[in-house]
Image (cartoon, rainbow, N blue to C red):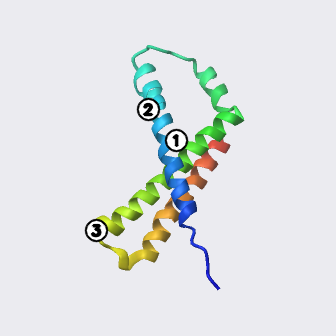
Amino acid sequence: MNRRSPEPFLWMLFSSGGMVAALMVPILLFLFGIAIPLDLWSPSHDHLLAVLRNPLTRLVLFGLCALALFHWAHRFRYTLYDGLQLKRYAVPIVVLCYGGAVVGSVIAAGLLLTV
């Protein structure tokens, strides 16, 4: 019996993580790295906390974190495979890369639930 490969699902996570990161990270970097420190926009602490406590905001931030981590895991896996020619260590590389993405996603979920 032929077993199906999870490869299409992993490529889907890779592409969606790259797209989400490319669209959302520059906005967040501009807001929290330029606009707020230079006083171009100065929201109050209470306003930012209220936005962060919104369930939709938490879901979007979790999606950004999880998809970006899976994008990294897939890119790093193939960098090790093709760039460094470490195909003989395929199983540990897969476990460490995608396991790290899962662990990072669980940590992100835990942090977002405690706010």
17 shown above or below 79: above
Furthest residue toward bottom: 1
Q: Position of residue 7 (x, y in %)?
A: 53, 66
Q: Which residue is mark 1?
A: 20
Q: Position of residue 95 (x, y in %)?
A: 49, 70
* Contact, mark 2 vs mark 1 (Cβ under 8 Å): no
Mark 2 or 1: in front is: 1
Residue 115 visible in the shown view:
no
Q: Amino acid at mark 1?
A: Val
Q: Which residue is mark 2?
A: 26
Q: Amino acid at mark 3?
A: Leu
Residue found at x 51% / y 63%: 98
Q: Looking at the image, which is closer to me, 23 or 5? A: 5
Furthest residue toward right: 55
Q: Residues within 10 Å of mark 3 (few under 14, many from 20)?
A: few
Q: Amino acid at mark 2?
A: Pro
Q: Position of residue 114 (x, y in %)?
A: 66, 43
Q: Which residue is mark 3?
A: 84
Q: Secondary structure at mark 1?
A: helix
Q: Position of residue 23 (x, y in %)?
A: 49, 35
Residue found at x 60% / y 25%: 48
- In the shown orientation, is residue 39 left or right of residue 49? left
51 shown above or below 65: above
Cα separation, mark 2 vs mark 3, equals 30 Å
Res 9 → quadrant: bottom right
Q: Earlier in the sequence, mark 2 or mark 3?
A: 2
Q: Looking at the image, which is closer to me, 2 or 66? A: 2
